[in-house]
Image: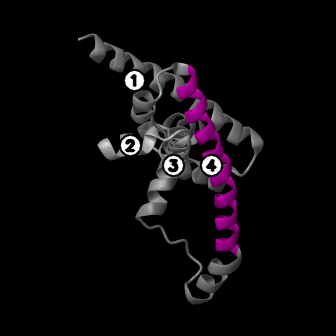
Amino acid sequence: MNSIYIFLMFDGMRELTIIFMSTWKFALTFPIAVYSLNNLRDILIYTNLGGLLGVLFFALLSQQLIRFWDLRIRPRLVKRVPSRTVFNRKNRRFIKIKNRYGFPGIVILNPVLLSIPISTFLVIKFFGRKKRYLAWLILGQFAWSVIYAVFYLYIKNDLLQQ
């Protein structure tokens, strides 16, 4: 933990680190954000900025990956493989999440169980790249950020009082 603390001491680096970490794994960023930043406003600003950038970046990346797969890889596979759909373990899991929870489930599970890249990819793949879907992902992330920040600040304050 000392190496993380030394890295976070440099001016501006802790904010950039929190922004970068929250683009990938939003929920795991909050203990570090609460430890290094002391007020709720800064925690919410930097984690949500990272989450927002993560959703937008991975939406563009997912769209490009899906397009590359459909144009370059799938035509080569179709020539070799019979025209039946192949369900492997990963495909079954994605379809199970989509069918069981739907879009609201992906929004709710986004920062909790899924990470921002996976949930954004699922939304782009199954629901398309519509602005309202990305807006709902970002809105769900904002709601979870308030819950996480208040929870970890409460734990931090409770531990300091003892």
Binning the other alpha carbons within 10 Å of mark 3 as few (below 14), some (14 to 19) or many (20 upward) gives many
- For discs 2 and 1, the disc positioned in front in the rendered view: 2
Binning the other alpha carbons within 10 Å of mark 4 as few (below 14), some (14 to 19) or many (20 upward) gives many
- Distance between mark 2 and mark 1 Cα atoms: 21 Å
User: Whole-percent x and y of residue 108?
Assistant: 53, 33
Q: Amino acid at mark 4?
A: Val
The residue pinned by badge 3 equals 24
The residue pinned by badge 1 equals 152
Any mark on residue 6, and which?
A: 2
Q: 82 above or below 91?
A: below
Binning the other alpha carbons within 10 Å of mark 2 as few (below 14), some (14 to 19) or many (20 upward) gives few
User: Whole-percent x and y of residue 144?
Assistant: 52, 28
Q: Is residue 61 magenta?
A: yes
Task: Please report the bounds of the magenta region as a residue range.
Answer: 41-70
- Location of residue 52 by image quarter: top right
Name the residue rendered at 47%, 67% in the picture.
Answer: 87
The residue pinned by badge 4 equals 123
- Distance between mark 3 and mark 2 Cα atoms: 22 Å
- Helix, strand or loop at mark 2: helix
Q: Amino acid at mark 1?
A: Tyr
User: Whole-percent x and y of residue 102?
Assistant: 57, 41
Tell which of 8 and 31 is nearer to you. Answer: 8
Q: Quadrant of the C terminus?
A: top left
Identify the mark nearer the N-term, 4 or 2: 2
- Is residue 3 visible in the rendered image? The answer is yes
Any mark on residue 132, and which?
A: none
Classified by dominant secondary structure, the portion drawn in magenta counts as helix
